[in-house]
Amino acid sequence: MQPCQSLERISDCAGETALTRVLNKGNTYQYVFHKPNPLMQGFYLMLVIGGFALFVQFGLPLLPNRRLGYFHVVFPFVFVLWVLLTFVAASNSPPGYVTAKNAALLERVYKYDGFLFVRQECSTCKTPKVARSKHCRMMGRCVEKYDHYCPWINNTVGGLNFRYFLLFVLSTAVFLVYGTYVIYNLLMFIIERDRLWDVKFMNTGTNELVKANWMIIFQFMMAHHGMLMFLLVLCAIMGITLVAFFIYQLYLIKNGTTSNEAQKWADVKDFYASKKWEREQAARGPDFPSDAELLRDTSAPLAERMVKEFPSKPPTNIYNLGFWENMKDVIWPASLEMKRVWLKIQEGKEKAGAAQQANKASEASSSSAGQTPSSATSTPSVASKDKRPTGRGKSGSKKKA
Ligand SMILES: [Zn+2]
């Protein structure tokens, strides 16, 4: 039997044995959990479009009413389109890949802090591991200001598309809160319209007539308006979750960390807390864990830097410029600005090159005359553009192509 090269190729292998059956299951597992796939995107669309269809079928006929005006007949349609638009934007926007071509440029935007990030090479891509970047195993590429891979949008969230991701989360969160508000009011409208508080309900077990209370009304609504009740619970639970998630994202922005870095800083904090504890214990007697023992759970190079270069407390996060500056970098990423300027420079260089070539050609053709100043006029335009690239990077040196 032909030996299998990898899990991806396992279905190509000859003959199915008990082992390959297990491994083939592993293949599905690999696809679902370790490969970019649209399963969660489909699930998201099913929830939003399916939920909205239920609203149109069961909620819309009750609108407008005493509680909700005409606005709520039209607005849900506009809102759901907006949410789907942010979903498409977040799913399709590139996170900003680090390549051999742009690494030098990105290194100007993202300085190494010498602590979490030191200059090294990505072992997979062989490109410089720019500060704040990380090799995304799902995409198989290095991503600038790597945040995380989001299965809901089947995309990696990085420096360039974090803003779309944030907009998507915010839009979906507000949409769900709004949905909760509308459906709650629809249900309250039904209770008022049918005067459920005034009617008497019959206990089917004892045939007794009982006065309405919240429990009885709840049971009645579940039996007669189950879909709206289901939508209320769905919107409320998902709404609370997403609002909390959005607040967490704001908290990370306030701290000037990506989700990826937040994890690292949490490890660092734990380490220094345990070191402090160690010192306190050491004051009482010997036989307490050494640095080496404390390092066991932390990733080795970072831990070594902690002990050697920052023995008493961790350095401050140099990427934290304060909430508004951090937010500005999310909405208008510095690397994007840098790339824009770089492209302009390239364009300028190309134009200058073309102009020079054209000049040379015209010189050659009119070789009789003694005109030479053309190249002198084309180069300064490049030089003047060369001075502009620093942008928010504040590294006022010259550009490298
Ligand atoms: Zn890489």
Image (cartoon, helix red, strand yellow):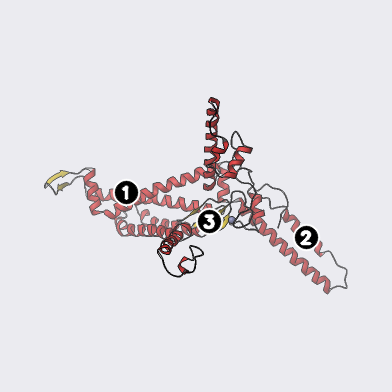
Q: Amino acid at mark 3?
A: Arg
Instruction: Say above or below: 294 vs 217.
Output: above
Residue 184 badge: 1
Q: What is the distance, in whole Å, between disc 3 and disc 1 at their CAs?
A: 43 Å
How many callouts does the rendering have? 3
Instruction: Say above or below: 121 vs 296.
Output: below
The disc, 3 or 1, on the residue closer to the chain's N-terminal end is 3
Disc 2 within 8 angstroms of ligand 1 (CB): no
Q: Are marks 2 and 1 in contact (CB under 8 Å)?
A: no
The disc, 2 or 3, on the residue closer to the chain's N-terminal end is 3
For numbered disc 1, what is the local secondary structure? Answer: helix
Closest to the observer, 246 or 366: 246
User: Mark 2 packing: few (<14 Cα in 10 Å), some, or many (20+)?
Assistant: some
Closest to the observer, 157 or 16: 16
Q: What is the distance, in whole Å, between disc 2 and disc 3 at their CAs?
A: 44 Å
**Ligand 1 position by quadrant:** bottom right
Residue 137 badge: 3
Q: Which residue is mark 2?
A: 379
